[in-house]
Image (tube, rainbow, N blue to C red):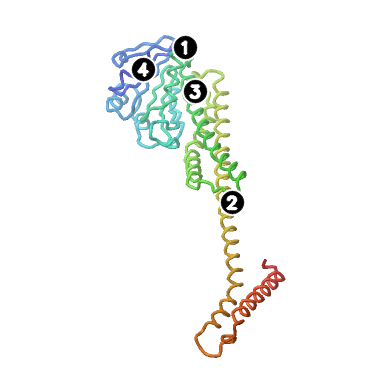
Amino acid sequence: MYDDQNTTRGLVQALVLDGQGGARPLSYEQLPGLELGPQESLWLHWDRSHPEAQGWLRERSGLSEFVCDLLLEENTRPRLVTLPDEQVLLFLRGVNLNPGAQPEDMVSLRIFAEAQRVISLRLRPLRATDELIAQLRMGKGPRTASELILYMAQHLTERIQTLVDTLTDHVDGEEDRIDADDRYQPDHSGLLQVRRRAAALRRFLAPQRDIYGQLARVKLPWFVEDDGDYWSELNNSLTRYLEELELTRERVALLLESEDRRLSERMNRTMYRFGVITGIFLPMTFLTGLLGINVGGIPGSGSPYGFTATCLLLLALAAGQWLIFRRLRWL
């Protein structure tokens, strides 16, 4: 069982990879003086906000002050730093699946890796590391340090695919509803949220894709021979997701533009009808107003047929206007 027994001291997990896909857990007290076999690798996963984790990293990890500063800096973006002695620093981002969080508010995972040791730091829990630990428990996890960081990247990328698919499905649904019903009004706030999420994801995924491309070209002695192929595949996957995100943003823009155009056309038709109605009734209103003034000499005021004659005159006026409007193609 890989329980979080050491989290109170900032150590989330300490595992020794056996080189066969499994691992055995360690406690905080077992770390000093630990000796690894030739096929074994050590993975230490820390909560970087914990003071004891920061103290261990600076005082007992054996890492330089420069590396510790990079691992503990407050804000960072995806990046790859190659270090002397065949060491690497890798900063990645994963989808935030914690309760109440926005998925596009991506969680940072900082990794220091060398031939037989991997140190990773996180601020908030990551589902990707939980799944990796479950694989190690079943004996189907990474065998070496290079495979460990590769597995982490793979799990992070799979979560990104789920979120990208969710955004795409939302836009697909809105397009289908618009095609099925001309009167349907799309959810503007939902579409704008999709667009914001796509933009936020692109901010981190673009440099992360470049990192995978660099790792595909890095030839460190402790990398497994076919690691480059897997990093290249992850690079291609992120490229595809970025293309999907860009297409999603364009589709959202087209949907909003189409809806604005439909609303504008509907408003123009309404205003046109009101204009035609006003054009027909304005002369009638003028005529009835003129006949309704309280002065002497109003035609037909003393005739029993005055009202009938006035109504016939208004009908004739309306018919004449209708013919004129038809000839002018206003109707």
Say what secondary structure mark 1 lies in.
loop
Identify residue type, mark 3: Leu
Mark 4 or mark 3, earlier in chain? 4
Q: For label 2, count other residues whose C-alpha is less than 10 Å away and answer few (under 14), some (14-19) or many (20+).
A: few
Q: Secondary structure at mark 2?
A: helix
Give the x, y percent position of residue 69: 34, 32
Most extreme residue toward the front is: 304
Q: Position of residue 228 (x, y in %)?
A: 56, 23
In the image, taking residue 209 as reference, residue 112 lies left or right, namely: left
Does label 4 or label 1 sit earlier along the sequence? 4
Mark 3 neighbour density, 10 Å: few (under 14) some (14–19) many (20 or more)? many
Image coords of residue 277 (percent x, y): 59, 68
Residue marked by disc 2? 258
Q: Label 1, on which residue?
A: 139
- In the rendered structure, which amino acid carries the disc numbered 4? Ala
**Quadrant of the rendered structure where residue 87 is?**
top left
The CA span between labels 2 and 3 is: 43 Å
Q: Quadrant of the C terminus?
A: bottom right
Looking at the image, is mark 2 or mark 3 earlier in the sequence? 3
Of labels 2 and 1, earlier in sequence is: 1
Which residue carries the number 4 mark? 14
Name the residue nearer the viewer: 187 or 122.
Answer: 187
Q: Secondary structure at mark 3?
A: helix
> Is mark 2 in CB contact (under 8 Å) with mark 4?
no
Is 22 above or below relative to 327?
Answer: above
Q: Residue at x 56, y 39 (%)?
A: 173
Q: Which mark is residue 211?
A: none
Q: CA distance from mark 2 to mark 1?
A: 53 Å
Give the labeled residue for mark 3: 150
Q: Earlier in the sequence, mark 2 or mark 4?
A: 4
What residue is drawn where x is 55% and y is 36%?
169
